[in-house]
Amino acid sequence: MDITEPKIVRDEILTLSDDNFNPRNVCIVTGAGTGIGRATAITATANNLMTVGLDINEEEGKRTQNMARDMGGQMIFIKTDLTKDEDIEHAIVEAAKLGAIKYLVNIAGIQHIDSVENFPMEKYDLMQRLMLRAPFYLSKLAIPHMKKNGDGQGVIGNMASVHAHICTLNKPVYNITKFGLRALSQSISAEGEGKIRSFTVSTGFVKTPLALNQVPSQSEQRGITPEEVVRDVMMGHSRIKEMMSPIEVANLFIFGFSRFAKYLVGGDLLFDGGMVLTYAQKKI
């Protein structure tokens, strides 16, 4: 069982024929420095979109930019602290200079494990600001640009999780923010009159640094192998015992943006290996 973050290769990227997938249209991706954000930024560039990656990690963000350009895509990286309104405002202004803002992907997030009674409020405030307020504010600023496009259309994708469907132990704020992103997507879509669409992508564990960094400590604490951690602990509720790759998640966003998904209005793409719908709720 491979439990390392996979390399992004061109053959695994979904590329679609869509007139709106051209360098005149801008796709903004948050969390572009690593994991799903990196994969989504590269996938957007592979689909001929002018991509603007946002992340607080400048070194890794620029690495993503170079990876995208090495594949022949067009990408600009802007160092952005999503907890600062002025950084968000700057990013939108700069993105608009590059073309028509057509797509926005809110992926950036962090995790903190603790019970409600022990949860530090400063961590609560940080997660809320990064994972719910920032997507809301980016959407608020991007939608007027989308309405000014020639066809008045735009799409906003939000990275949710199985935790947007079920609440698991000791992840209260993660649960809250992911449920909130589904509500945000539905709210945007309710107001969008079919022209401004929004949707969520919900997955289980994905081979990202956020997930993979949990494996060694879980292995040590439980006295089992890393492979057993993935198969029996992380994927114990999934009918597929292997974590998704970041590019598989990125491909879902590209599909959701495309002409093939015009009826995806406020909906959720639940790709979780059966964790939510085919297993009884247990302590996970």
Image: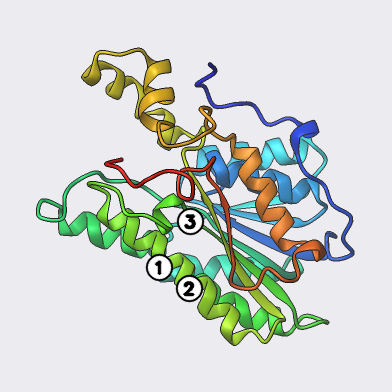
The relative height of residue 224 versus residue 124 in the rendered view (above or below) is above
Q: Secondary structure at mark 2?
A: helix
Residue 234 as seen in the image, left or right of residue 171? right
Callout 1 environment at 10 Å: few (<14), some (14 to 19), or many (20+)? Answer: some
Which color scheme is applied?
A: rainbow
Callout 3 environment at 10 Å: few (<14), some (14 to 19), or many (20+)? Answer: many
Residue 61 at least partly seen: no
State the residue position of label 2: 184
Give the percent coordinates (x, y) of residue 190: 57, 84
**Mark 2 belongs to which amino acid?**
Leu
Number of numbered discs visible in the structure rendering: 3
Give the percent coordinates (x, y) of residue 68: 72, 41
State the residue position of label 1: 180
Which of the two residues, 268 or 196, is positioned nearer the viewer here? Answer: 268
Give the percent coordinates (x, y) of residue 61: 56, 43
Residue 265 at least partly seen: yes
**Mark 1 belongs to which amino acid?**
Gly
**Mark 3 belongs to which amino acid?**
Ala
On residue 89, the disc is none
Q: Which of pointers 3 and 2 lies earlier in the amino acid sequence?
A: 3
Which of the two residues, 214 or 271, is positioned nearer the viewer here? Answer: 271
Residue 183 as seen in the image, left or right of residue 273? left
State the residue position of label 3: 160
Location of residue 177 by image quarter: bottom left
Callout 2 environment at 10 Å: few (<14), some (14 to 19), or many (20+)? Answer: many
Q: Residue at x 53, y 68 (%)?
A: 90
Residue 10 as seen in the image, left or right of residue 157? right
* Mark 1–mark 2 CB contact (< 8 Å): yes
Query: Dividing the image into 4 quarters, which one contains the C terminus?
Result: top left
Give the percent coordinates (x, y) of residue 181: 46, 66
> Marks 1/2: CA distance?
6 Å
